[in-house]
Image (tube, helix red, strand yellow):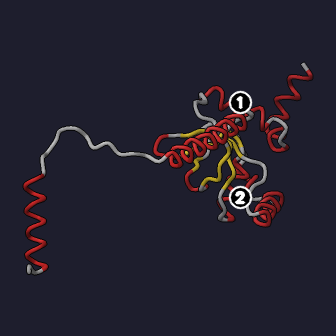
Amino acid sequence: MTTQKEEAKRLISAAKDNFVPTSEPVKRRVSMNLVSDFTGELGRVEDELSEAKEKLAQYSQSLPTKKLDPKKIVASKFANRVSTSFNDAEFELLKEEIKSAGGNVQPIKVRPLKDAEYEIVYGHRRHRACLDVGVDVLAIIHDGLTDKELFEEMSRENEQRKDYLLMNLPHITREVST
């Protein structure tokens, strides 16, 4: 009668003696249920991808908006904002509105700069209000905007502004009267 240890040694020895290494890969069998499950899941993923592409196509001509830290945004080098416009009662009302809404509802427009910072195209007062109140600023991000395009967009956005009109009134008056 052999003990369990002796029997285990005998089986291990027999297994070693009969083991013949082969270079052929081991062929594993895959159950048809697994294949069916995979193809079904693949079909669902392809459907979701198709739906996502259709939704994305609706916004192909859009510019992205994003909440940005106002500390990472700098004023434009072309800014034509009168500094007193950040000290009047209207600016205080704007800050209160932004504070109560949890941020600006009308986005500013920015272009990316080096080092993950942004430059304001337009919306200097909304940016400053968000900075003063301490909330992120909603911004349209326009990559690849040239200096000329920035200046044109800023001018177009600001030409109806009250202090812009007051700054340029003598010039406009001269042009109209001549």
In this view, the mark in front (2 or 1): 1
Marker disc for residue 61: 1
- Quadrant in the picture for residue 102: bottom right
Q: Please, what is the three-letter code of the amino acid marked with disc 2? A: Ala
Residue at position x 78%, y 38% in the image:
158
Which secondary structure, mark 2?
Answer: helix
**Residue at x-position 69% and y-position 59%:** 130
Q: Which mark is residue 116?
A: none
Q: Nearer the viewer, residue 27 or 160?
A: 27
Q: Is residue 33 above or below residue 25?
A: below
Which image quadrant is residue 81 in?
top right
**Disc 2 packing (10 Å; few <14; some 14–19; many ≥20):** many
Give me the disc on residue 129.
2
Q: Is residue 132 left or right of residue 32?
A: right
Q: Nearer the viewer, residue 51 or 33?
A: 33
**Quarter of the figure that contains the N terminus:** bottom left
Q: Position of residue 25 (x, y in %)?
A: 25, 40
Which residue does the image show at 88% across and 29% down from the upper left? Answer: 173
Image-based side of 20 in relation to 74, left or right: left
